[in-house]
Amino acid sequence: MANILVLDDVLDAVILVQKILSRQGHQVEVYTKEEDAIDHVASQPVDLAILDIKLKKMNGIQVLAEMKKLRPDLRVIMLTGYPTIETAREAVNLGAGEYCVKPIDKQELEEKVAEILAR
Amino acid sequence: MISLPLLPAVIIDFSGSAIAIVLSFMALRYSRLLARLQPNNFIWGFLFYFCIAMAAFSLSRGVGHIVRILLLFSDHNEMWKQLSPLSGGSNTMLMISAAAVTIYYHKGLDAYKALRTEAEKLAEANAKLQASAGQLQELNALLEQKVEERTRNLSESEKKFRNFFENSKDIIYFCDKDGFITSINTSGRKLLGLKKPVNSVTFYDLFAATEDRKKYVAELQSKGFVSDLEMECRLEDGSTRHILLSANTISDRHGKMTGCEGIGKDMTRLKTITEQLINHEKMASVGQMAAGVAHEINTPLGIILGYTQLLMDDFEPESEMHTNLTVVERQAKACRRIVADLLRFSRQSESIKTSVDLNRVIEEVLSVTEHTLGIHQITVIRDFADELSPVFGDAEKLRQIFINLINNAQYAMSEGGKIIIATREDDDGVHFSVTDTGTGIPAEIKNRIFDPFFTTKDVGKGTGLGLSVTYGIVQEHGGTVGMESPAAHSDASGTSGPGSTFHITLPAFPPGTAFKEDM
């Protein structure tokens, strides 16, 4: 089972993802603040990060860049309610493995996580 | 034979006769000079004529005496005897004439003067007449010149106004008192689509709205003019035009209305553009609002959906709670579709654009929908252009357009009918239209059909986003969408209803055209 980090500025949303993935047996840590999430990646083992793009202080792309600097092999799923070709391209170029549009279905989330962890 | 003692008397007679002749002629000459010197002097005038008579008498008498003397001295007494009565008669007559001059001179002079006065008057009158004739001739020439000038000016003016009348791009018309058109320019006939003789058409018949016609008539009658009246004209072919009308009455010298004249400006295009612009602005602001709402709803909706699905795992699939949660999940997913549609309408969803063959896209949609349409007694007629340039677009979204339009057409034809799908291409781009033979779209809702959540369908049958999404997709592709009802296609008439036609135009993307990011 994997260590998964979830970052979203909406607490209910991160707890939901935590509950869904915990039931799959994963160790899930959730954050609503960008710097706390980055600190976690810097200090703790993380296999997969699920990042929202629209955050309060930074945007998800910047957080992705910071995390990739700390841990280049980190697998990342980007989530967004505002999908654009530009952010998708940027995210993929920075090493994101998936780019999903919210609201994401439980089953779809489980499948995406399983798929990226299997790579 | 003459005896000698008479000789002195004969000599005196001879010389006296000769002297008398000479003196009488001298007196005549002198009197003539006097008469010439003072023509109006009565004495000199009388003297002159008296001298003439006396000179003639002296000549007759003197010559008679001299001839007598010469004949007597030459023994021609017989000849003198024959001439003597003639000489005596002549003398008598001339003496009588001298007496007549004395007696009748003043009367003759009066008559002469009277005659001369009359002649002078006549001459004066004649001179005046000639002067008048000259003046008249001069006036006549001036008049002719002025008439010529006025005629030329009138002709130029007539030509100027005729050109203005004929070349004007506006409608210029004249009517009689009953409203029958007496004259209308070429643009007017063309813009109003008048094919039959214009004098059989009343201008009142052209008004599509009774209120406009009443206002036109009332203002003409009360004020004598109409200024900038917006009227909707109904043409013979059933189409309408928006005209900005100004007119005024024509009256006779007693002020009685004999007709009216007016100018109409075709505002159809301007009105259409204005409406499109207003609609575009409205749709843009509605789209912006819809996008904002959609984004705000997305997150809580995702959480509701996620927790529902999470809870469903906690209950047996056959349990009542699981069934209830399934309903919540289904409705949450319905909300998610609406949010997705709103984002598509507001052009907030991303597109993957490629070169797309519209004929193929339509065929793909029909391959899925035609069977269902057949079940509902709806026949699909394909009127595709053989050669059609591709468009640069998102094939999935373009499919969505056809699905939405076909769904609406099917809904409008509950008793069956026809769907005519046509594709064309010209300089403006690639055109396609979807026509149905259904119930048509009432005029009062035509402006609202593209509004989000506007629907005429029963609750639960439609979200009112189909045409909004279509509008958003067309806008995103740089195209235009329009609708007309009754339907434009001739095949659509006379089946089950007036029908409606949706026209969509997209920019053509011929092979080899450079890709543009902003498309």
Image (cartoon, coloured by chain):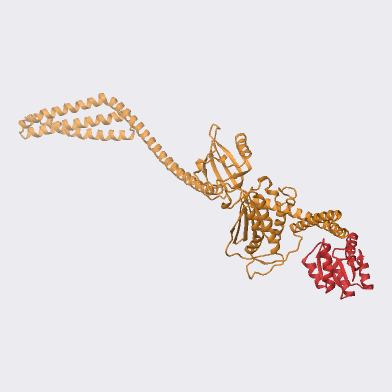
Q: Quadrant of the C terminus of chain A?
A: bottom right
Q: Quadrant of the N terminus of chain A?
A: bottom right
Q: Quadrant of residue B228?
A: top right
Say which of B516 and A95 sits in front: A95
Q: Quadrant of residue B38?
A: top left
Q: Quadrant of residue B82?
A: top left
**Farthest residue, direction front:** B318
Left or right? Give the position of B205 relative to B292: left
Left or right? Give the position of B408 relative to A88: left
The residue depicted at 11 percent of the width and 33 percent of the height is B67
- Percent coordinates x, y for residue B474 in the rendering: 69, 59
Say which of B356 and A48 sits in front: A48
Question: According to the rendering, which colour does chain A have?
Answer: red
- Percent coordinates x, y for residue B181 in the rendering: 52, 41
Above or below for B385 versus B483: below
Task: Note whether residue A96 is visible.
Answer: no
Question: According to the rendering, which colour does chain B have?
Answer: orange
- Percent coordinates x, y for residue A110 in the rendering: 84, 66
Above or below for B21 versus B312: above
The residue depicted at 64 percent of the width and 54 percent of the height is B375
How many numbered dots are placed on residues in this image?
0
**Farthest residue, direction top:** B103
